Image (cartoon, rainbow, N blue to C red):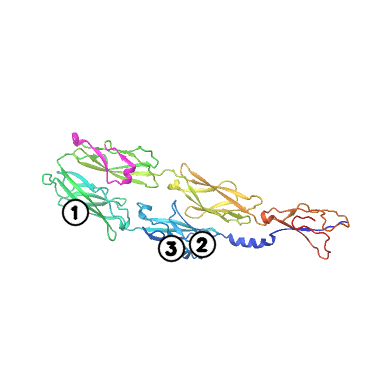
Amino acid sequence: GWLFWRVMACGRRSGDRKRQVILFILCVCVCQSGAETLRYSLPEEMERDSFIANIAKDLGVPLSQLAARKARVVSEGNEQLFRLNQNTGVLTAKESLDREEICPQSDTCTLVFKIFFENPLQLIRGEVEIRDVNDNSPVFPEKEMVLKILETASPGSRFPLESAQDKDVGINGLQNYSLGPNPHFSLAIGTAKDGVKYLELVLQHQLDREEQGELNLLLTATDGGSPPRSGTAQVRIVVVDVNDNIPVFERETYEVRLAENSPLEQLVVRVAAADPDEGSNGEVRYAFTQTSERSRQLFQLNPTTGEIRVAGRLDFEEAKSHKMVVKATDGGELSGHCKVQVEVLDVNDNAPEIALTSLSASIPEDAPPRTVVALFSVRDRDSGDNGRTECSIDGDLPFSLTPTFDNYYELRTNAALDRERTAEYNITITATDWGRKRLSSQESIFVQISDVNDNPPEFTQEIYTMSVTENNSPMLRIGSMKATDADAGINARVNYALVRQESKEQPEVSVNAENGDV
């Protein structure tokens, strides 16, 4: 005789599928990168590990969530300046912060950081303003300045002096100058268009070399701190005999535009001063005065020809302009002055930099569209269009890029995923700037798709026909069935069982749950 029966093959975790789907839907509602910004301030020169804020309290996040969601702080730039304690939620400064070192020549010093959370991905922007402390005194470039002035110089004549420098800013920066009491000179303080104060010595009364051949004046620079700090320099006036003419420059101000990638020794400008005197009194030599140390490092002045050439690497991102004063002195020690203003032009010499901030190790194949996979930032140190960037994904992939803020992007899914069709993706992100000669960089992100139990087992045949002789021994193997499952791992393991039909006697055969043997 013949026996017929049906066998049901079940995935090991099919009973959990509904629960898994519900749980996953709750988990993948990824928080959008909020636009809120945390703002704090901290005086410079505080001790390391100084308290800045309680991030957990300010964000209203339970402390347990900080560790569970792997909260961390990332500073902009290569140096990480802050530390986040996941146990207390307290944000601290890793080291003592020196405003003059971090933000040189800047009136404000704001450090930007990001707080990152995972599970779900979330990004919070923060700022810490480093407040200036009056920890620097005004300093003159030279302790003594020597001026040689004709005894025939008329009252009202002006003579430039070297300015002092103060690394502090605002009220703590350089505020005023004063000149020690003397019968011949007063001090004139002017302010240039860029806000920098400049000094000139003004002759009030005629000089007489025979009466006094040399004068010593005390020049004092004072800041506005409480208490104020000051620095001094000696001004030595040497009264010289008549030398009819002083050197006169062709122009009062030389304005030059120069690309930031200009090679060393490139000619910037040639200043020229004429002196009609004869002999040594008409021979002119050139030198920088009232010029910052940084500008002296970047530019070289030929004392004989007046040629100014590039001596260092110009960087638009460091300084957009340089101002110099050139003094021309003849053999009789009379001098004239001119200004040189160099505008540095930006060149597209920096490719965009891609920094991966957060990446999900894997995403389930039933993740809904718009699920966040990764978070990254793009930075270009150039300016204008040279520093403006755009991002794209290579290839036709089920992913898209969503810009957030501060040049951050989210990599999201934009279509349904199927692990059985594609189990992993190697996504290449390209960042390109808008410069005339466009520069770009690439970053590869590897994304694995985790399996979800979304495929039922399938038998290799719809009907299996087997025969057995009567009077056989119990537990005799009479055949085997095979079912496969397209899922992976435990979701692909198959169990076999007989389907008992109502009103039917118990079948006289059994099936092995593991291998399908009958």
Where is mark 1, residue-wise? 180
> Which mark sits nearer the N-terminus, 2 or 1?
2
**Residue 167, percent from left and from top:** 32, 53
Return the residue nearer the eye: 415 or 31.
Answer: 31
Mark number for residue 66?
2
> Which mark sits nearer the N-terminus, 2 or 3?
3
Left or right: 260 as drawn, with respect to 487: left
Q: Which residues are magenta?
A: 277-303
Give the CA distance from mark 2 to mark 1.
62 Å
Residue type at tag 1: Gly
Q: Is residue 276 visible?
A: no
Task: Please tell me how many numbered marks the rendered image carries.
Answer: 3
Observer-side mark, 2 or 1, equals 2
Q: Say which element carries label 2.
A: helix
Q: Is residue 501 visible?
A: yes
Marks 2 and 1 close (CB-CB < 8 Å): no
The stretch drawn in magenta includes residue 301:
yes
Q: Quadrant of residue 300?
A: top left
